[in-house]
Image (cartoon, helix red, strand yellow):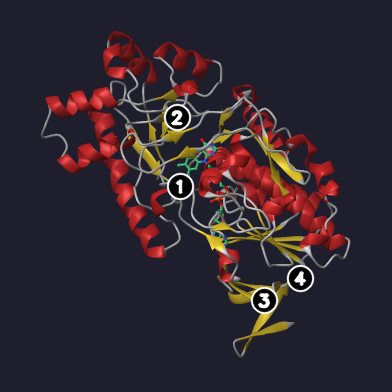
Amino acid sequence: MKTITVKGHEVPIIAEPDVFIAGGGPAGVGAAIQARRSGASVFLAEKLYALGGTLTSGLMSKIAVAQMTNGLPLEIIRRFDAYQGTHYENSRPEVPVDPETAKIILDEMVIRESGADVHFGTVVSGIVQENGEIQAVLLSSLDGECAVRAKYYIDCTGDGQMAYLAGADCMVEGGESYSSSPTLMFRIGNCDLEKLFQYEESHPELFEHVYTTYKRHIMDAAQCRQNIEDQIYAHMADFVKLIRARCAEYPDAFTEEEQEVLLRRGILFLSQPAPNHVLVNSTTRPQFRGDREKEVSETMAELRRHCHILFRFAKRFIPGFENAFLMDTASLLGIRESRRIRGDYVLTQEDVESFRKFDDAICSNGGGVELHSGKANSLVLHEQDGKGTYNIPYRAIIAKDFKNLLMAGRCFSASHAALSAARNISYCCALGQAAGAAAAILSLEGKTSVRELDVRKVQEITKDNI
Ligand SMILES: Cc1cc2nc3c(=O)[nH]c(=O)nc-3n(C[C@H](O)[C@H](O)[C@H](O)COP(=O)(O)OP(=O)(O)OC[C@H]3O[C@@H](n4cnc5c(N)ncnc54)[C@H](O)[C@@H]3O)c2cc1C
């Protein structure tokens, strides 16, 4: 077996694919499928035991998919509908999906159909590089330490972990020197939503929206009921008036700290394709960076406790939730933003808000800035959906000063504010699709640098996302 010498000891090289992909979230899935379709061999390392990342293990199972995104992300959504016998495609720009269904569909598309070599429980733990050229990636798995030597490497870890280990220039922090705050998602089962809607209709004053949100998310009970019936996403928020009323009426039900937790985001229920349960997107933590293990560990435990506080409120005070149970909390913290890898170009807020176009566009977005500080009612929204689109250039997915390193997903090269606009699941998947196409073309053409790509060849493949 071939080996590579790392700090004086020999590490076995277990594979030599054209393309190595770190992380199997929406970006890694897009990259793997497209690289295989473009003819490259692919090795994908995923530290968890399912594909999908935040979409599955993070339980963030609602895909934002803009009208201009018609490539692989839409193909995946159509697979959900085919599997479930549903028509959630009509729910665009927001498509609720079942996270368990997502796991099986992504296994099917990535492992069985595309033939990518997927390794679960396998963590990228080190990089061997020389003068900006990655020689091998070091992996830690049940087998111990091993190495993979590829022609091109794509960082889809969300946290920019592979690039960070390679010594790439990583950008962390944004407004007030913190990243956007994280959320630990959870699900509540056995809810009687019709009972909730009827209560809301008889007590509308308790259900007025107080906190800033998207205009399209302000839905009354009738609209939610109809959307659920029509297989369209329903948004049930924010319960702030109800929380204040019940906490005033029952001052001993929740401590002061628990009341503060309840009022950070209010309660935000998202509809899901399966009946009688809701997905809850409510926990949040201020002053988060996302690039330190201790911080992430503490946040995971703290927000898990908050899930139980929110559940306790729902069970006791939300009509229709008397017999509900807490189905699950996510096994992966929902991190909106951590490290971003500096590329040859950094996408800016101005690019987003001026709907800037680039010659080397690889996909287009429509979403506007959406910043979460984690404090009560602090969401910053610049709604611009439907007003225009901006491009993401190829130069924002190639790592500065590296010859064979690309990145896709939420660790791509964007400022804090620009990333907040362009981190949705379908965008991450579209960036992955472009990175996979680029890496496959470069490796099969024998090119030695990401800067030798004829980007028009990628554009031909990703034209349905531009
Ligand atoms: C609370 C919240 C709400 C959101 N709401 C929406 C929404 O409504 N609609 C929408 O479309 N998007 C939403 N998003 C955004 C979206 O979910 C993420 O931006 C997107 O999933 C990022 O995809 P990714 O592939 O870049 O990273 P991730 O989904 O984070 O996946 C990264 C993968 O890499 C793996 N990994 C990490 N490090 C390593 C390593 N060292 N070795 C091997 N594997 C590794 C992880 O296990 C994971 O599977 C939300 C995000 C959050 C957190």
Q: Position of residue 37 (x, y in %)?
A: 81, 49
Q: Give the residue pinned by disc 4.
A: 16
The part of the image, by quadrant, that contains residue 375 is top left
Which of the marked residues, 4 or 2, is nearer the chain's N terminus? 4
Q: Which residue is mark 1?
A: 334
Q: Can I make out residue 389 in this image?
A: yes
Count all numbered tags in the image, as a single digit.
Answer: 4
Figure check: 112 above or below 88: below
Quadrant of res 155: bottom right
Asked if one can make out residue 1 in the rendered structure from this viewpoint, the answer is: no
Name the amino acid, label 3. Answer: Gln
- Circle 2 sits in a helix, a strand or a loop, which is it? strand
Amino acid type, residue under disc 2 in the picture:
Leu
N-terminal label among 1 and 4: 4
Task: Residue type at mark 1: give it.
Answer: Gly
Q: Please name the residue that numbered disc 3 is placed on.
A: 129
For the C terminus, give its image quadrant. Answer: top right
In the rendered structure, the answer to whether residue 147 lies left or right of residue 332 reads: right
